[in-house]
Image (spheres, rainbow, N blue to C red):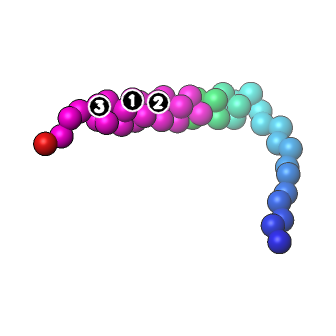
Amino acid sequence: MLISYKFCIYPSQTVQNILEEQLELCRWLYNRLLSKVNRAGKVKRC
């Protein structure tokens, strides 16, 4: 049996800005690594 909980949070503007910045950094890193993986897959290996 799987139990899940849902919580509403109401961050201050400062905390909201920090969370958005962290999410943006995660998105950038994910896209950067995905790009490198895709380019590495196109390289022919012996």
Regarding residue 38, the answer to whether it shows in the image is yes
Q: Which mark is residue 31?
A: 2
Q: Are marks 2 and 1 in contact (CB under 8 Å)?
A: yes
Q: Is residue 28 left or right of residue 14?
A: left
Q: Does the magenta portion include 15?
A: no
Which residue is denoted by mark 1 in the rendering? 35
Type of amino acid at the residue the image marks with label 1 = Ser
Task: Nearest to the eye among marks 3 and 2: give it.
Answer: 3
Magenta stretch, residue numbers: 23-45
Separation of disc 3 and disc 1 at Cα?
Answer: 11 Å
Q: What kind of residue is marked 3?
A: Lys
Question: Marks 3 and 2: CB-CB under 8 Å?
Answer: no
**Marker count (numbered):** 3
**Helix, strand or loop at disc 1?**
helix
Q: Between 41 and 26, which is closer to the camera in this rendering? A: 41
In the rendered structure, find residue 42 and report the number of the disc placed on it.
3
The kind of secondary structure the magenta stretch mainly shows is helix
